[in-house]
Image: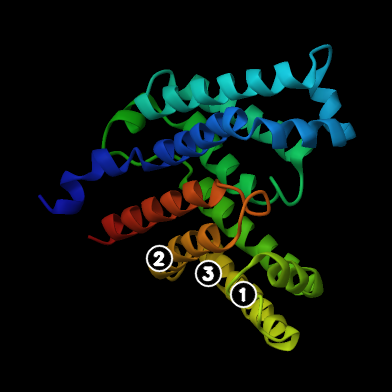
Amino acid sequence: MSSLARNAAYVNNLPRYALGIVFLIFGIDKFVGFDSYLAWFEATDRAKILTSNLDASTFIYAMGVVEVTLAILLLVGIFVRKTAVATSTALVAILAVAQYPSSFPQDLGLLGTSIMLVFASKDQRTSGLYYQFPKLARFGLSSVLVLWAADHLLYTSTHVSWLQLFNLTVRNMPAEQVFVFVIMIGIIELVIGSMIASGKLRVYPYIASAVFFVIAFLILAPPLNNYQSVGLAIISSWMIYITKYRQA
């Protein structure tokens, strides 16, 4: 038996771990970064729809508890399908309320993986059998990259200003060079996203996406990129593995 086959059962859990890690980070962040969340809730009218009769402080702490609880269930592997239904619902709500740039399009990638877990059978969640509908995860990854690319190419000047303001690497570069840098990022995102969507070039697009999401996480500070790139990089790594496994 190949090493790929021997490790299949462990690698099969990577999408679940990825989702769990992201929810855990955001859940803990509700307590650690409470003041920034409170300020955002108080300044955002659409967020008040979620708070209902609760005050913003109570709602933020409640969100933190729920996110940490969902994360633990995912990481431990208990009630995976029900938990995935809950995380899918939460991601849809977050996409609707947080919107761009905090949630959209990053959470689309996580939503694809979460829905994939909803459809997974018990055997697929506990063995080396890979999940049904892996295209959900694949198109989730590609959608993030393609939409990021569109944003970089359509709103280049905005990204140039943001990078010069917040990124130490390019702060002292001339605006013209930063402009070219942003355009190059957009083109790379578009190429990688399109390759992943096509599914024809096997493992290489997923390697590129894993590297790209790691770089994105290191370069772009929250909340403009948030921590979703951690989970998306892990999901990309899982796609690398199953692509190689199917070739073996």
Residue 176 image point, x, y percent: 74, 88
Q: How far is the residue under mark 2 from the one under mark 3?
A: 11 Å
Residue 207: mark in rendering: 2
Tell which tag, 1 or 2, sits nearer the viewer: 1
User: Looking at the picture, does residue 164 appear above or below residue 177?
Assistant: above
Would residue 240 appear left or right of 53 to someone viewing this image? left
Question: For the residue labelled by badge 1, is the local secondary structure a helix, a strand or a loop?
Answer: helix
Q: Amino acid at mark 2?
A: Ile
* 10 Å crowding of disc 3: few (<14), some (14-19), many (20+): some
Q: Amino acid at mark 1?
A: Ile
Question: For the residue labelled by badge 3, is the local secondary structure a helix, a strand or a loop?
Answer: helix
Tell which tag, 1 or 3, sits nearer the viewer: 1
Q: Which residue is mark 3?
A: 195
* 10 Å crowding of disc 1: few (<14), some (14-19), many (20+): some
Of marks 2 and 3, which one's residue comes earlier in the chain? Answer: 3
Q: How far is the residue under mark 1 from the one under mark 2?
A: 16 Å
Residue 152 image point, x, y percent: 72, 70
Tag 1 near tag 3, CB within 8 Å: no
User: Looking at the picture, does residue 134 appear above or below residue 205?
Assistant: above
Residue 185: mark in rendering: 1
Colour treatment of the image = rainbow
Would residue 20 appear left or right of 169 to someone viewing this image? left
Q: Amino acid at mark 3?
A: Met
Which quadrant of the structure image shows residue 159?
bottom right
Task: Write the residue at 22% across / 60% down.
Answer: 248
